[in-house]
Image (cartoon, rainbow, N blue to C red):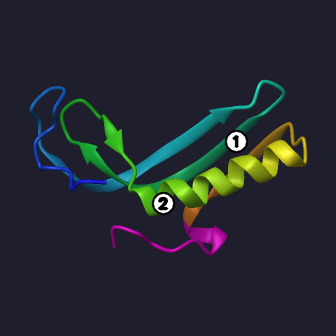
Amino acid sequence: MKPISNQCPLCKGLISKGKTTFTADLGFGVVVVRQVPAMVCELCGADWIEDSVAEEIEEKVESARRNYQMVTISHWQYEGASQALG
């Protein structure tokens, strides 16, 4: 993944380190991960998640899919996940 500039490509606002909420609809259930480290536009709220963070989220989604979990809600900080982006 190439580095994200500090200007939002959507609205030209300032992008800085922040947190976002990731959601995935599995059809039979949902996965929600709160407080995910991301780069967030201060103007429009668009967000970008680094590849290493996305890989860990993908593992959570696949686990929920394999176990046919209807609802999975977690908090990034308390899952023992690495704190990418500081």
Q: Quadrant of residue 1?
A: bottom left
Residue positioned 87% across, 43% down in the render: 69
In the picture shown, does residue 13 fall above or below 76?
A: above
Residue type of the residue flagged with mark 1:
Val
**Residue 80 rendering spot, x and y as whole percentages:** 62, 75
In the picture shown, does residue 32 fall above or below 10?
A: below
72 lies left or right of 57: right
Residue positioned 43% across, 56% down in the render: 51
Examine the structure image and report whether residue 83 is included in the region drawn in magenta. Answer: yes
In the picture shown, does residue 4 fall above or below 23?
A: below
The boundaries of the magenta stretch are 77-86
Give the residue at mark 2.
Answer: 53
- Label 2: how many Cα within 10 Å (few below 14, some 14–19, many 20+): some
60 lies left or right of 71: left
- Label 1: how many Cα within 10 Å (few below 14, some 14–19, many 20+): many
Residue type of the residue flagged with mark 2:
Val
**Residue 71 rendering spot, x and y as whole percentages:** 80, 40
Q: Quadrant of residue 55?
A: bottom right
Give the residue at mark 1.
Answer: 31
